[in-house]
Image (tube, rainbow, N blue to C red):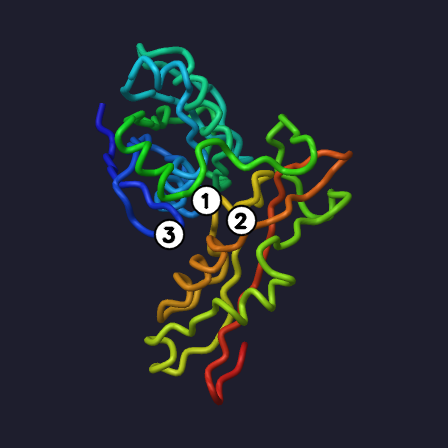
Amino acid sequence: MFKYFLLFTLLISAGMVEAQKVEFYPAKLFPAKPYGGMEELERLVSQLMVYPEEARKKEIEGKVFIRFKVDPQGKARQINISSGLDRSLEDEALRIFKHIKWLTAKEQSANVGELDELQIAFDLRKYRRVVKKRGYEKLPEPSLPTSDTLITFSINELDEAPKIANASSINSFLAEHFKYPSIALQRGISGRVSMEFVVEPFGQATNIQIIRSLPGGCDEEAKRLVRKMRWESGVKDGEAVRCLYRYDLNFVNPGGEIR
């Protein structure tokens, strides 16, 4: 069975490091597409992975295989997981997998084509490097109880919208961290980058997807900024929940304008 093969080294918000490997074998017919592509998929695994304690003590390593299909609504179906490893590693891989947001596509069908396959590697040496780089072993906990449904709500569905936590406002955050890309500056590029991303209960953005693109390094700068942001999560029914957040970042060159 012919499948395309993509192999990447994980990225985390502070830059590229040696980390757990993720292999994605899309089905030849109507493959699934994660929000933000493989770059964000790899980053999500690096953000979320918490190596199970018992498996870590026993030094159990290896790959977990997840086969699935994404339906036209962007929901993963027909999920099958296997590894031959400790069950706790399978459970952790499945937990991570359930955080992946998939692009919807009218041509996708749960009854057509082959299953996609995602492989998540558990490597203790590389995992320790990831933990050191990202700055936490266990996921940071919000002040409120966390919903275990993993439903991603829109802002309009929430009782309280997410708020930026590492600045007094998004504007003040941008005033401190924004850097106009040199290529865009030289070429006189102005415009708007529109993004969607999921604000997680543990206070970081995952699944960053560019909705409206701008050349000259503007997309990359927009993603860099979002990756640096820390959040107080959205709240629904007294619980910290996942929220799909849309943000527009304007790039205005001297003498330029936003269209």
Does the CB distance between marks 2 and 1 fall below 8 Å? Answer: yes
Q: Which quadrant holds the N terminus? A: top left
Residue type at tag 3:
Ala
Which residue position holds label 1? 35
Q: Which label is found at residue 197? A: 2
Q: Calculate the distance from the C-alpha at mark 2 to the C-alpha at mark 1.
A: 8 Å
Nearer the N terminus, badge 2 or badge 1? 1
Mark in front: 1 vs 3: 3
* Vertical order, 64 against 43 (above or below): above
Left or right, residue 151 beside residue 131: right
Residue shown at the point (35%, 19%) measured from the top left: 56
Residue shown at the point (42%, 48%) measured from the top left: 36
Residue type at tag 2:
Phe
Q: Residues within 10 Å of mark 1 (few under 14, many from 20)?
A: many
Identify which residue, 18 or 5, lies in the foreground: 18
Q: Calculate the distance from the C-alpha at mark 3 to the C-alpha at mark 2.
A: 18 Å
Q: Position of residue 207 (x, y in %)?
A: 48, 44
Q: Position of residue 14 (x, y in %)?
A: 37, 52
Q: Residues within 10 Å of mark 3 (few under 14, many from 20)?
A: few
